[in-house]
Image (cartoon, rainbow, N blue to C red):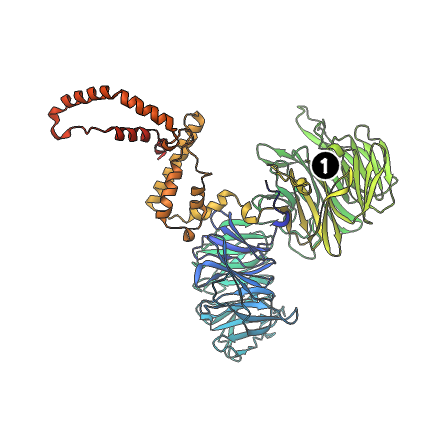
């Protein structure tokens, strides 16, 4: 029961993983990346998220390892705090309150009690590099107000800041102007004029600095530029005698640079989606890792030097071995330029489906917060050119319980030149994927505004309806495709409807599939799905219909429509009259497939508000103001595998389904009572402990022992002979296994409690649980059999006279009584060892 907890808006995924450079752990087992308000810890081997460090109240802008303790991690945020984490256990150690927005974070080993950060204190466009002193204190929250100024008028991007050889200097650039500050002489810095003359730059390309990197052991600076060139600067202490060499392969701007740990090679990346390794800093000796899928925005190198990492514009992180072989891919929610298809749920995988890479549909797991796979719809090579008009995937819909998928793609360079194509995909059980079945060129003369399947359970024939700006809606049905074996099927147009040449804007089927509602600008028409006759029309002259949907279950007789003028209307289909209306600027309206509830999100100057209601009652069941400061563009209900048990009437709309919504910045949010850390799977939580075990002989013995235990348990469960004691719900075992080792009591203190908890039996009562009357009866029986025992003892004496010292020890009555009690204890657990 979770009714005591409050429902809150939780960021459940979709945050940018490529906002800042990823950071490796010292042993290269884990990688850290910022993700909205959180810091996520991923395994570099399994790609699983093992921890979510949540505690910041605003966007996380920087992460760095603690140079004095590689098991700790620093993070900074726009909330004005710097937090220190124990990433192995996912515990917040300390919070330093700075008081101003922090845009980037840098740590150096020489500064033990301070870190460097980029802040803007006076004006929003003026950024400064400051040194923040972190005071030592035993309290968990400490004020860190002591800021030391380093440099002014710098770029807020951390890619334009680099610390030099042994941290003797720090390099910063702002457009054309580089600045070098010597940290040992805190008040001294100079601005070298790294001029690029036209004689050396014959093409007159843009020379703006885009990123910088400093050599780890030498006084050498590498800079990337807008013209795609990389320049290596030396002898920069003298602005008249400096020298530089040029490396050129990128045809577009250099996005990021990184030196290897030893400094023998330089890594670069850009919009070509190719990682370039310049070995020995020479243009002739370079290696490539091509076809990485998207623009490289950040490059990171592990402290051990065995792994590289690239962050890409499609919200993806690729982990690369030292020999330039990709080993793992961490794919988040792909950030498309715009979500035309909206949010859909795959009936088979329960994955969230929406626009992904250009021309693709992405299937995104809401439980694990990662992408499952991509479906190539357009099936053409994407050319990255800002001036080129691309083919856009504009509409998609699932039908027939996931057996069919309809997609619409279009390209329009001019108003009179429209390329339109509709594809229908059939799910194949053998390949476990969708296969193209029918391709229809120009299904309408103008853009398609909506499409929907008839998903009624009693529907005999698959039916699809499309609405278009050309003033028509078309009904497509699945028929035999003139095959003599009657095995080939295809889609064909069965009916074309219109209403006074108005543009068709929305369409939807009723729950039982008997009615079809099509909106023509301000008018809603109701059609019979069997005869395709027009039954009735609704017209309120309240503006064009923006959203249209039928009620569900007991409210199936109602039809709801939201207009562009901010009016929500509810019509009764039995009386063909307006039931009620309300003034509400609805941007998102989604019905719950498992209940009568409908969620509507309205937009105001203060943000987005949520209203949950039933069509039969104009009064909302639940209202929550300010669910997001930005505009909410899409929403969807996801059926729960296991229903919740909210007893409060205000929260019962979340019992059978969970509501997700997507904001303008493409952040995925939901309503929940659980924190992000609680949503991690048990397998993910155990990865930290399992991966930390060394591969010693004892490790292999332990692994075989666990495997043997699992086999034994499975055999007993199948045969139903013996039920071994389960330790999942024992508090002692839970505390011992899930509590961090450094905060546990001594092993001597826990040993007795732990062993006693394992000796508990569910089938046989222990000696302490045997009633006293049973003991009394046993004592009487023992007294009655004294004579018999004496006879047995005499026989044993006569038989053992020749044994000498091996005479059997005779037990007293009290010892025999203790043995009887000891015999009652269940030792079946020893068989599992």
Q: Nearer the viewer, residue 775 or 610?
A: 775
- Image location (x, y in percent) of residue 258: 50, 62
- Image location (x, y in percent) of residue 404: 67, 35
Q: Residue at x 81, y 38 (%)?
A: 518
Q: How many marks?
A: 1
- Image location (x, y in percent) of residue 818: 29, 31
Q: Quadrant of residue 343?
A: top right
1 left or right, relative to 219: right
562 left or right, relative to 199: right
In the image, is residue 278 above or below residue 574?
A: below
71 left or right, relative to 426: left
In the image, is residue 434 above or below residue 693?
A: above
731 left or right, relative to 608: left
Q: Residue at x 64, y 72 (%)?
A: 122
Quarter holding the C terminus? top left
Local SS, label 1: loop
Q: Is residue 445 visible?
A: no
Q: Nearer the viewer, residue 807 or 114?
A: 807
Residue matched to label 1: 596
Q: Residue at x 70, y 57 (%)?
A: 387
Q: Residue at x 42, y 45 (%)?
A: 736
Q: Is residue 385 visible?
A: yes
In the image, is residue 490 above or below residue 360?
A: above
């Amino acid at each position: 029961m979770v009714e005591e907890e409050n429902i809150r808006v939780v960021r459940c995924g979709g945050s940018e993983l490529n906002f800042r450079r990823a950071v490796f752990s010292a042993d290269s087992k884990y990688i850290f990346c910022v993700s909205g308000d959180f810091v996520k810890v991923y395994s570099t081997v399994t790609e699983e998220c093992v921890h979510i460090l949540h505690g910041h109240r605003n966007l996380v802008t920087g992460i760095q390892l603690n140079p004095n303790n590689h098991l700790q991690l620093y993070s900074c945020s726009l909330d004005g705090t710097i937090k220190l984490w124990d990433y192995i256990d996912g515990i917040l150690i300390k919070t330093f309150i700075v008081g101003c927005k922090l845009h980037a974070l840098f740590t150096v080993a020489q500064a033990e009690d301070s870190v460097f950060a980029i802040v803007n204190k006076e004006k929003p466009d003026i950024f400064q590099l400051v040194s923040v002193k972190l005071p030592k204190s035993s309290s968990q929250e400490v004020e860190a107000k002591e800021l030391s100024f380093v440099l002014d008028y710098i770029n807020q991007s951390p890619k334009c800041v680099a610390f030099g050889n042994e941290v003797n200097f720090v390099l910063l650039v702002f457009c054309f102007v580089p600045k070098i500050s010597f940290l040992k002489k805190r008040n001294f810095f100079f601005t070298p004029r790294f001029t690029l003359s036209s004689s050396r730059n014959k093409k007159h390309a843009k020379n703006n600095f885009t990123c910088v990197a400093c050599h780890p052991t030498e006084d050498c600076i590498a800079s990337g530029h807008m013209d795609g060139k990389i320049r290596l600067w030396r002898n920069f202490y003298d602005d008249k005698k400096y020298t530089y060499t040029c490396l050129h392969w990128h045809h577009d701007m250099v996005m990021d640079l990184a030196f290897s740990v030893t400094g023998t090679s330089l890594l670069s990346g850009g919009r070509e989606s190719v990682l370039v390794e310049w070995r020995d800093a020479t243009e002739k000796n370079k290696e490539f890792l091509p076809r990485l899928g998207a623009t490289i925005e950040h490059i990171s190198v592990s402290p051990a030097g065995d792994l590289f990492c690239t962050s890409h514009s499609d919200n993806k992180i690729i982990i690369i071995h030292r020999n330039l072989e990709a080993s793992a891919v961490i794919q988040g929610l792909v950030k498309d330029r715009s979500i035309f298809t909206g949010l859909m749920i795959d009936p088979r995988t329960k994955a969230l489906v929406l626009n992904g890479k250009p021309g693709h549909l992405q299937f995104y797991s809401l439980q694990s917060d990662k992408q499952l796979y991509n479906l190539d719809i357009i099936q053409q090579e994407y050319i990255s050119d800002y001036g080129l008009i691309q083919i856009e995937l504009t509409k998609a819909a699932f039908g027939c319980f996931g057996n069919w998928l309809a997609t619409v793609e279009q390209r329009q360079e001019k108003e009179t030149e429209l390329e339109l194509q509709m594809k229908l995909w059939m799910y194949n059980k053998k390949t476990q994927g969708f296969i193209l079945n029918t391709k229809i060129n120009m299904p309408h003369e103008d853009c398609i505004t909506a499409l929907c399947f008839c998903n009624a359970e009693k529907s005999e024939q698959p039916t699809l309806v499309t609405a278009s700006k050309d003033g028509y809606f078309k009904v497509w049905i699945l028929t035999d495709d003139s095959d003599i074996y009657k095995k080939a099927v295809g889609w064909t147009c069965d009916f074309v409807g219109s209403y006074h040449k108005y543009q068709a804007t929305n369409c939807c089927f009723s729950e039982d599939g008997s009615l079809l509602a099509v909106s023509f600008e301000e008018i809603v028409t109701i059609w019979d799905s069997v005869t395709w006759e027009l039954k009735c029309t609704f017209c309120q002259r309240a503006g064009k219909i923006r959203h249209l949907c039928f009620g569900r279950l007991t409210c199936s007789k109602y039809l709801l429509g939201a207009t562009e003028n901010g009016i929500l209307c509810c019509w009764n289909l039995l009386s063909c009259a307006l039931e009620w209306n309300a003034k509400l600027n609805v941007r998102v309206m989604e019905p719950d497939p498992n209940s009568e509830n409908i969620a509507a999100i309205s937009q105001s100057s203060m943000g987005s508000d949520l209203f949950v209601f039933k069509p039969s009652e104009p009064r909302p069941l639940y209202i929550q103001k300010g669910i997001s400061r930005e505009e909410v563009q899409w929403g969807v209900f996801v059926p729960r595998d296991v229903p919740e048990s909210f007893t409060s009437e205000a929260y019962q709309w979340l019992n059978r389904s969970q509501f997700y919504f997507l904001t303008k910045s493409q952040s995925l949010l939901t309503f929940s009572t659980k924190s992000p850390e609680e949503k991690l799977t048990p397998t993910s939580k155990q990865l930290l402990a399992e991966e930390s075990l060394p591969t010693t002989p004892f490790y292999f013995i332990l692994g075989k022992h666990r495997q043997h235990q699992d086999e034994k348990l499975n055999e007993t469960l199948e045969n139903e002979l013996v039920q071994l004691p389960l330790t999942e719900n024992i508090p002692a075992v839970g505390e011992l296994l899930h509590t961090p080792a450094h905060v546990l009591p001594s092993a001597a203190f826990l040993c007795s409690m732990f062993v006693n908890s394992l000796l508990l039996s569910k089938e046989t009562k222990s000696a302490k649980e045997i009633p006293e009357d049973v003991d009394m009866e046993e004592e009487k029986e023992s007294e009655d059999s004294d004579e018999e025992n004496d006879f047995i003892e005499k026989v044993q004496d006569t038989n053992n006279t020749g044994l000498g010292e091996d005479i059997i020890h005779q037990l007293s009555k009290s010892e025999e009584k203790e043995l009887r009690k000891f015999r009652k204890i269940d030792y079946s657990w020893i068989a599992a060892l």
